[in-house]
Amino acid sequence: MNAFIIIAGSIALATTVGHFAVGSKQFLKPMLEAEFDAVPKKVMHGVFHYVSAFAIFALIGARG
């Protein structure tokens, strides 16, 4: 198996786990609890989930 594919899969896995574990706790929850307009909150919430889906697809794509 190609070493670059293994490296890409490892990076994708670490990024995905970090996004879900650290990102939701340190970024998403404080943003949703902040005191500002509802529209930017909804946009940030949508972007967070978009990046989550992108990370999962990158992980699946890296695995082949």
Image (cartoon, rainbow, N blue to C red):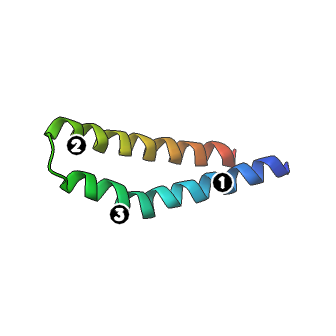
Residue 50 lies left or right of residue 11; in this view the side is left
In front of the other: label 3 or label 1?
3
What residue is shown with label 2?
41
Dot 2 amino acid type? Lys
Quarter-of-image position of residue 62: top right
Q: Amino acid at mark 3?
A: Lys
> Sequence-wise, which precedes: disc 1 or disc 2?
1
Q: Is 21 drawn above or below residue 8 in the view shown? A: below
Q: Disc 1 residue type?
A: Ile
* Mark 3–mark 1 CB contact (< 8 Å): no
Q: Secondary structure at mark 3?
A: helix
Q: Are marks 3 and 2 in contact (CB under 8 Å)?
A: no
Judged from the image, the secondary structure of the residue bearing numbered disc 2 is helix
Q: Residue, x 27% and y 58% (percent of image)? A: 29
The numbered dot on residue 25 is 3
Q: Position of residue 63 (x, y in %)?
A: 68, 49
Which sits earlier in the primary sequence, circle 3 or circle 2?
3
Report which residue position mark 1 lands on. Answer: 11
Q: Identify the element where label 1 is drawn.
A: helix
Q: Quadrant of the C terminus?
A: top right
Find the distance from the CA under tag 3 to the CA under tag 2.
Answer: 15 Å
Mark 3 to mark 1: distance in Å?
A: 21 Å
Residue 11 picture quarter:
bottom right
Q: Earlier in the sequence, mark 3 or mark 1?
A: 1
Left or right: 11 in relation to 46: right
Q: Quadrant of residue 13?
A: bottom right
Q: Residue at x 51, y 48 (%)?
A: 56
Q: Which mark is residue 20?
A: none
| Label 3 Cα crowd, 10 Å radius (few <14 / some 14-19 / many 20+) | few
